[in-house]
Image (cartoon, rainbow, N blue to C red):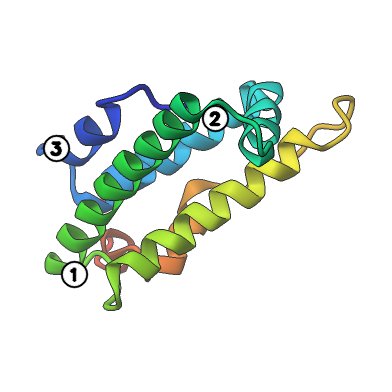
Amino acid sequence: MLQPGEADRLSEESEKTPRERLERFVSETMRLRQEHPEFYRFVFQAVSEQNLPEDIRHRLGAHGLEIRGALRRLVIEGQAKGEVSEGEPDQLVDVILACLEGLSMRLAYSDPSTKVQLPDAGIILRLLGPDPSKERGGPT
């Protein structure tokens, strides 16, 4: 899980394109979730509990909003630069987060003795449109 403040840092790395920062976010999120599926299983179970203490529920919600806000800024910046397809930014963020959550649940609830193969971050980002650097023959 990204630490508080890290989501903003991801959206402010000016030396990278918005698409590169989105790819880094997706890659890092998937790496952490693959390395620690038990932590995310615990989080999923805790969030679904009706009696989760309010302060913890509030902190988890605030952290989720921080991540959502950083992703939204990256999507809007990527759209302005032609790196992300047109569309409602919040809906595009929902698609990214839904993919990550679904893959995380798959990892969290899979048989620990079975190696779950996750898609490359670039595959998830294709949902936001083709990678313009690959269309121009730029660096990958």
Residue type marked 2: Arg
Q: Is mark 2 in CB contact (under 8 Å) with mark 3? A: no
Residue type marked 1: Gly
Q: Residues within 10 Å of mark 3 (few under 14, many from 20)?
A: some
Residue type marked 3: Glu
Q: Which residue is mark 2?
A: 31
Q: Which residue is mark 3?
A: 12
Q: Where 5 falls versus 97 (above or below)? A: above
Q: Which mark is residue 82?
A: 1
Q: Identify which residue is drawn at 28% across, 61% down.
A: 137
Q: Where 91 falls versus 19 (above or below)? A: below
Q: Position of residue 16 (x, y in %)?
A: 18, 41
Circle nearer the N terminus (2, 3): 3
Q: Is mark 1 in CB contact (under 8 Å) with mark 2? A: no
Q: Identify which residue is drawn at 59% across, 30% down.
A: 33
In this picture, residue 28 sits left or right of residue 86:
right
Q: Identify which residue is drawn at 45% across, 65% down.
A: 126
Whole-angstrom CA distance, mark 1 to mark 2, is 27 Å
Circle nearer the N terminus (1, 2): 2
Q: Position of residue 115 (x, y in %)?
A: 80, 32
